[in-house]
Amino acid sequence: MNGGKTYVSPDDARPPRTHKTGPVSSKPDATEDRHIFRLKGVSKRWAGEHGFILTVPTLTIGKAEKLALVGFSGCGKSTLLDLLAMVLRPDDAGEFLFFSGIENRLDVKAAWRRKDLDMLANARMLHMGYVLQTGGLFPFLPVRDNIGLSRQGLGLPAKDAVEAVAKKLNIERHLDKLPGQLSVGERQRVAIARAMAHEPSVVIADEPTASLDPINADEIMALFTGLADEYGVTLIVATHDWGRVAERGFRRVEFSLEQDVTDGAVRARVCG
Amino acid sequence: MRLGKMENLHGFETVVRLSLRDYFHERLLSICAVLGLAAVLAPLLVLFGVKSGIINTMADRLIEDPRNREVSPVGSGRYGVDWFAAATKLPEVAFVIPQTRSIAANMVLFNQDAGEPRTVPVDLIPTGEGDPLLLKWGRIPADDTSVVLSASAARKLNVTTEKEISGRVGRSVGGIKEQVTVKLKVAAVLPIGAFPREAAFVRLRLLEATEDYRDGRGSETFGWPGNERPPGPREYPSFRLYARSIYDVGDLRDRFTDQGMEVYTKVEEIEIVRSLDRSFTLIFRLISIVAVFGYFASMASNVLANVNRKSRHLGITRLIGFSTGSIIWFPVVQSIATSILGTLTAVCLYLITELMINRLFSQYLSAGEYVCRLSAAHLLIALGFTLVMSILASAYAAFRVARIEPSEVIRDV
């Protein structure tokens, strides 16, 4: 499954991932090595004028799968993305597992309960990439260093891998520029490159093409999904525009919204 | 676990690099912060420099000025050889020498080289090895016929160093006036202010011979006629005594007062300068506490504003997966950079000011004296202190960074 990661130079030796996610229990489960996320009964509540509750009755995401979370803004897409990116603490969770590699299971629920934020951060740096709708790049770093940030943070050699992924996204001529010198579309390519450069298991993208003109949006989405397929990376994209991704092999996950008549709270359920 | 630590180190290094890159990228704001720090620190350094320069110069002058260390008896007493032997051994005493009867301790000096002869009656002051007054301003007479003249005596005689003069001592024995003359050589002339009267500092032997001659006795050393001196140890009515430092003067006075002696000292004047020093120190401390508080507040608010302004970037740093322990160094590193650059700027400004102040007052200062002065150690302490302050000032900002929730900040537009 990971055999598609051809852009890594041969001298780029990494320690086996099994040592890196911290305490890991491996229960024999035939399905686990095909999953990347498994959520059961996960929910997040937002206090507010009326309140908002997102519930994930059950959501299983397979390795190298492409998943599109489709819905209007405010339906809970970003909340689910942040839950999956392990930067948002769920209020309830029956089960919340992240399988970063074969026989390598991180109990996200337990880590949140222990407030072990560094363990979650470490898992993010090793196994995840995140693409925001806009920005997210460091304005003071040249494109090269922006892309190589996770690799530097992990102590991995950056130069070859950064140049390889930049080439695939057609931004290699911008490597020594600052993000401020680039167009919005070019910046999104840099953001995708950064999310990919450290060979993560999963890349999460929140409306990655929503700020772009349709031509650029299509081109970049094509590059993005192509890269994900090529490297065997699980791709989770939130979008309000199913049409943009419909032809690209995404599984569609939707949100059902209903308003509680008694307290006015909006209840969102993930239907996947 | 080993791997985990290595990762934290990589993360730490990367965050330090990010922080410094950001600091450089926003160099205009960074320069403002550096100048802000220098603006607080430079006047403070000048203030401390002036304080330490003036007070040290004043204290040195006070300590070094032998006149402030002099302890002299009021009236006349009877001090034997034993008393002087004991006094020499006192830890507070730098120099002590017997003084003969003041009525006999004088002679008339005359200089015949200067066209019309000039005569000046002078007091004879005993001196010897280790006399602080002569060590500071003149030199110790090498032999029994060398003299050191006070400024006014030398002026009235119109003589300078190395000149030959004569001294005349007269007496009346049975109504017959007699006098002897001794050839003297001027070893040194004291500056004005070192000694107020017309006086000649001479070896004790010449003083004792003068006293004996007045008593009708002779002196073999100087070939003066007269009776034999009766055997037995001498006793002296007075003495010249100098304390080791101004801080010993009070103790010496107490010691002599306990012995029933009344002495004259400059304890009161010394106490005035010492209390001035204490008041100055207090004032400087108060000023620096206010300045330090101001600096702390400005540094802390600066760092905090920075962290709030950059919360999105810091949130993204967390989103990428840098550990809390690494990210909190982001504001601290910038704060440290500001404190190092700010201190260096302040030290440069201070050194220029120090040069100007000392040049301005150079005519009032002798070699090795400064109006404004800080040692390299002082400047290093200032740097260390600023570093500690900057780390403390950025501690709350670092705490805020640790509490940043990526999900709350990464979608800020």
Image (tube, helix red, strand yellow):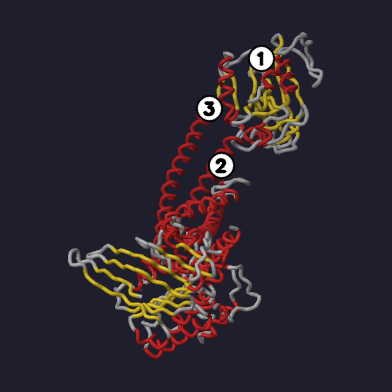
Residue beneath disc 3: B267
- Determine crowd level at label 2: few under 14, some 14-19, many 20+ residues with C-alpha closer than 10 A: some
Q: CA distance from mark 1 to mark 3?
A: 23 Å
Which comes before the other along the chain, label 1 or label 2?
A: 2
The mark found on residue A40 in the picture is: none
Q: State whether residue B274 appears in this view.
A: yes
Q: What kind of element bears circle 2?
A: helix
Circle 1 marks a residue in which chain?
B
Circle 2 marks a residue in which chain?
B
Residue lying at 49% horizontally and 54% vertically, measured from the top left? B391
Residue beneath disc 1: B79
Q: CA distance from mark 1 to mark 2?
A: 38 Å
- Tell me the amino acid under the disc marked 3: Val
Q: Nearer the viewer, mark 3 or mark 2?
A: 2
- Determine crowd level at label 1: few under 14, some 14-19, many 20+ residues with C-alpha closer than 10 A: some
- Determine crowd level at label 3: few under 14, some 14-19, many 20+ residues with C-alpha closer than 10 A: some
Q: Position of residue A69 (x, y in %)?
A: 36, 77
Front in this rendered view, residue A137 or B252: A137
- Tell me the amino acid under the disc marked 2: Asn
